[in-house]
Image (tube, rainbow, N blue to C red):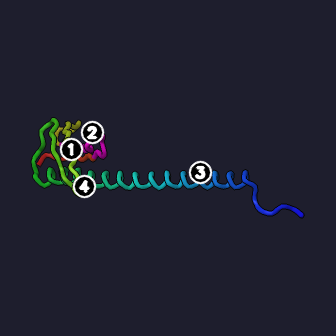
Amino acid sequence: MKPRGFTLIEVLVALAVVAISLGAGLRAAGVLTDNAARLAAVISAQWCADNQLTGLRLASAFPGVGDADFSCEQLGRTYAGKLVTRPTPNPSFRRVDAVLSDEDGHVLVTLSTVLPRP
């Protein structure tokens, strides 16, 4: 008569495979959570940049060359921003970049536009 069941080695190997699989699954879930949080931060930073550039367009003023700092709050987060205004080859236009960073100083988004002389 043959013995039935699994040996201790087979059970330990099966447990090791399950443990490795669960660990990989938990890591993947953690990465997805981090990506979702980063996406929310980038989208709200883009809203801030778009709001600043739209405000410049609505002001109908020709911006001077230089840098200007601003802050913006979206979805309960405060973002540090900088408007970088540079001349273009055509003196009737200026390029404006809105650069937004998170609390750690990492750039989240840069949005650019060209504004005409009114």
Label of residue 105 in the image: 2
Q: Which residue is depicted at the point 26% across and 46% down?
A: 112
- Residue at mark 1 to residue at mark 3: CA–CA distance: 42 Å
Residue 40 lies, in percent from the top left, at 32, 55
Magenta residues: mostly which secondary structure? Answer: strand
Q: Quadrant of the N terminus?
A: bottom right
Q: Which of 99 and 27 is in front in this view?
A: 27
Apparent side of residue 90 relative to residue 35 in the rendered image (left or right): left
Pointer 3 residue: 20
Q: Of marks 1 and 2, which one's residue comes earlier in the chain?
A: 1
For label 4, count other residues whose C-alpha is less than 10 Å away and answer few (under 14), some (14-19) or many (20+). some
What amino acid type should be assigned to the residue bearing mark 4? Trp
Judged from this view, the residue extending furthest toward the right is: 1
Label of residue 80 in the image: 1
Q: Of marks 2 and 4, which one's residue comes earlier in the chain?
A: 4
Name above or below for residue 10 compared with residue 80: below
Q: Give the range drawn in magenta.
A: 93-110
What amino acid type should be assigned to the residue bearing mark 3? Ile
Residue 13 lies, in percent from the top left, at 68, 51
Q: Which residue is depicted at the point 39% across and 51% down?
A: 34
Pointer 4 residue: 47
Q: Which of 87 and 3 is in front in this view?
A: 3
Asked if labels 3 and 4 touch by Cβ distance under 8 angstroms, the answer is no
- Residue at mark 2 to residue at mark 4: CA–CA distance: 18 Å
Asked if labels 3 and 2 touch by Cβ distance under 8 angstroms, the answer is no
Apparent side of residue 27 relative to residue 110 in the rendered image (left or right): right
- Residue at mark 2 to residue at mark 3: CA–CA distance: 36 Å
For label 2, count other residues whose C-alpha is less than 10 Å away and answer few (under 14), some (14-19) or many (20+). few
Apparent side of residue 62 relative to residue 86 in the rendered image (left or right): left
